[in-house]
Amino acid sequence: MALLSRRTDLPFERDDSSRYLPWLTAFMVFLASLTLAGVFAISDLAGTWDKGLSETLTVQLPAGEDERTDERRAAAAIKILEATEGVEEVALLPPRQVRELLKPWLGAAADAGQLPLPQIIDVEIDRDGIPALATLTEQLRRAVPGAAVDDHGAWMSGFLRALRSAEAIAVLIFLLVGVATVGTIVFTTRAGLGVHREVIEVMHLIGAHDRYIAAQFAVRSMMLGLRGAAMGIIAAAMVLIAFGVLVEFQGFGVLPGIDLSLGAWIAVVLLLPATGLLAWLTARITVLRSLARMV
Amino acid sequence: MDEIVRFQTVGLRYGMGPEVLQDLSFTLTPGSFHFLTGESGAGKSSLMRLMYLAKKPTRGSVSLFGRDIASLRHDDYPTLRRRIGVVFQEFRLLPHQTAFDNVALPLRVSGMREKEIKKHVEELLTWVGLEENMAAWPETLSGGQQQRVAIARAVIAQPKLLLADEPTGNVDDRIAARLLHLFEELNRLGTTVVIATHNKSLISSSLHPIMHLEGGRLSIEDRESEPAATVETLPRSGRL
């Protein structure tokens, strides 16, 4: 395959302009790998939360005058819920668990048992089979005045919006890193064209096509790009693994762990051929455009 | 094709400077052999540059192999240049390549297979007396040896037009005569040759016409065109 031949007529080994290209590429690919991993992690997180919360409802019953009223109301609500198509599981939270949930807001008063606490029912649903939320709420309110049904929609939409924004920013950063990489290769290639101008002129006068000269720059750029990309990916993989271990041990709570999916790792590894291709293509186009201006 | 080179009222200037070539009109037919003479600064190298497509004229028209260069697309240049062999005055060998690789370059850019390249290059370098220097870097060769490498590079692809700028400037008379024989043999096989030179003994050793440049203007002195010396047998019968 002539276009990928390693033999070169240009003295690239004496060319200082491309000496730092592998290091610059390594840094770019390192950033791109972390960003890409971030995109996948955010996407997985959003998917997990979305799926988890979209399959549950929370029914809140106002506190009654006494325990017997509470029990009667809970039983009525549970009966309606269990009879509703699409409801898969209904569980009344024990008062102790409700107090635990409210403790961050009510403090010691929640434990004292002096405050009338609402009853909470966790409902697992099949989202496709459940009737409209308004209909269910109406049925519950007829049995238990003041009953409220929360499908976490408002909270979820805000949370998902924030995640999607973070995801979009990460994609933007990824693209900017790509543009910066292209810019670096263009700059290095142009510098190389200047350094080798004399040799290129001789090659032209001997009858070399622009494509012949461009192929040599492109292969050189690709090899440097691949070397840099390999370094960047290895460094990024080490950081990602270390970060995953740190999160695992520190237990940051809200984060469900940084276990990257297989798809994410494949995407990171694919940055290697992608960088090689980008370097090859960028150098080739740069050289062809520059040589087109020569006699 | 009855014209290899055709100049019509050609002028050339560099930047905003004066014209270094003025109103040049001449035709080189296939198989012709000319010496190009003139004082230093008369415009010999500029005329050569126009003929090997390193420059475009600022006025007039230049045709090579029947094609007006003003109408050439960028992609057409390599095809035409492969039909032109050039011996540059300053050799312009690639310093990072061996003598072998320098001579092989025109064949490589034209896509010839390495096995054939090796055969042709070794044969030609042996003929020009550089069989011991094939793997040598240009900087380790003498001026005369570098010049022979440059000549070998110019003729390796059997050009239809050979342009040589002071090709015997750094070699002794014996090698100069040998190189002239090489050019004449190429010429006998149909290559049009133009040799820019100050070497009076080289010019007087043959009867080829002289193109004389003076102050950017050209005159042509026709002499009876007969070989002045016996032509040596070249390698690869039919190739050179």
Image (spheres, coloured by chain):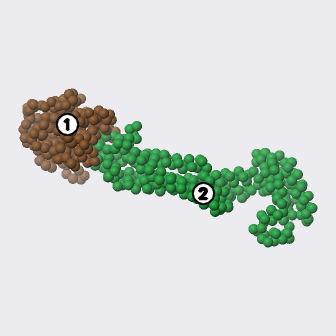
Chain colours: A green, B brown
Q: In this view of the protein, which residue sits in the foreground, B92 or B97?
A: B97
Distance from label 1 to label 2 (Cα)?
67 Å
- Report if residue A228 is visible in the image: yes
Asked if residue B209 lies left or right of residue A269, the reply is left
Q: Work out whether residue B165 can be spotted.
A: no
Q: Quadrant of the C terminus of chain A?
A: top left
Q: Specify the subunit that label 1 lies on.
A: B
SS at badge 2: helix
The mark found on residue B126 in the picture is 1
Residue depicted at x 44% and y 50%: A227
Q: Amino acid at mark 1?
A: Thr
- Label 2: chain letter: A
Q: Position of residue B158 (x, y in %)?
A: 23, 33
Residue B90 falls left or right of residue A142: left
**Residue under the point 23% across and 36% down:** B122
Measuring 38% from the left and 41% from the top, which residue is drawn there? A5
Which picture quadrant has residue B91? top left
Q: Are marks 1 and 2 in contact (CB under 8 Å)?
A: no
Q: Which mark is residue A59?
A: none
Q: Residue at x 56, y 56 (%)?
A: A240
Query: At which x and y percent is residue B221?
Result: 9, 37
Same subunit: marks 1 and 2? no
Q: Amino acid at mark 2?
A: Gly
Q: Nearer the viewer, residue B161 or A121?
A: A121
Q: Which residue is mark 2?
A: A244
Residue extending furthest toward the top: B238
